Image (cartoon, helix red, strand yellow):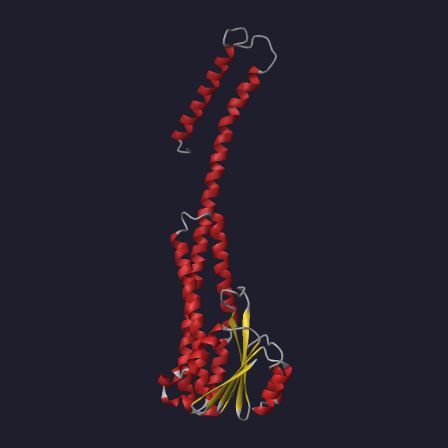
Amino acid sequence: MVEKRQYNGLTWIDASCPTPEEVRALVAEYHIAPSAGEELFTPTAKPRVDLYADHLYLILHFPAAGPNVRTGGSHEIDFVIGKNFLLTVRYESIEPLRVFAKAFEVGALRDRGEKNGAHAGHLFSHLLKSLYGSLLHDLEHLESTLIAIEKSVFDENARDLVGKLSFAGRELLASKQATRLHHEVLTSLESSGAQLFGEDFKDSLSGAMGAYYRVREALESNKELLHELRLTHDALVSAKQNEVIRTLTVISFAILPLSLIAELFAMEVQGKPFTDVANGFYGVIILMLLALASIVVYFRYKKWL
């Protein structure tokens, strides 16, 4: 589906899951370079930016997010930025683009500076800033989740906590992998965009660059918090395992003398005490209880219990 929106002399064309015929029509209509046009048909592993005579071609990946999206993947967005048009091509539903579309339709960009109508580079900068803002919101939500885990780390069920930490780690890794090359691409875009649109493009892009840096800081902050939570969780699990092992060792050591006494009185030999004595069985039981009491007193003295 291809949707066209116009504002202040600019056209934004948003192609969501376009057919090959729709892509070819867009390439022909906006005179997109053949090499860039071919890239619109297939996914690309790494982001990049290419400068052509009258437009820029840019590929960026963003982490997949949303209630109906499986965590761990990324969405690719292809941008073609001309003098008076911006083309976005994607093959997944991306929520920040839908939100930006609403702002575009109601003219909310009007209050973001009078230069918006100069060229599509300004429009692209606002769109990129919106994408990073959405990603930052997701990272802030992840940080809140990690803080909640931190508060319950000492009384949380270990199995549930492992699942929550793993899910948070997966979300963080997806965001980090998707945006790991954005700095290099944005730096190249700043130079290429200045050649095409003029030096004022750098000022326009600075807002998006600032949003990216905030995303990067949030990623590092969440990474450190997740690392500390995992270390704390591992230490608690290790302490619990050591406690269980110590308890089992104490029980085994306490049972060993009792088993030895039972085995001795089970031997078929002459002269065995309590054999011909009335209530001899209870005498053996009292002897075993005395041995157990002695062991418990000794363990408490050694502070093993």
Whole-percent x, y for residue 235 in the image? 45, 49
Residue at the spot 60% in from the left edge and 91% down from the top edge: 28
Position of 220 compared to 281: left or right?
A: left
Whole-percent x, y for residue 26 in the image? 58, 87
Check the image and report above or below for 93 versus 282: below
Query: In the rendered image, is residue 286 in sight?
Result: yes
Residue at the spot 50% in from the left edge and 78% down from the top edge: 184
Query: In the rendered image, is residue 221 in sight?
Result: no
Whole-percent x, y for residue 290 in the image? 44, 19
Whole-percent x, y for residue 150 in the image? 40, 54
Check the image and report above or below for 102 versus 234: below
Instruction: Name the residue nearer the viewer: 204 or 131.
Output: 131
Image quadrant occupied by the C terminus: top left
Residue at the spot 59% in from the left edge and 85% down from the top edge: 36
Position of 42 compared to 225: left or right?
A: right
Image quadrant occupied by the N terminus: bottom right
> How many numbered marks does the figure carry?
0
Instruction: Name the residue nearer the viewer: 90 or 55.
Output: 90
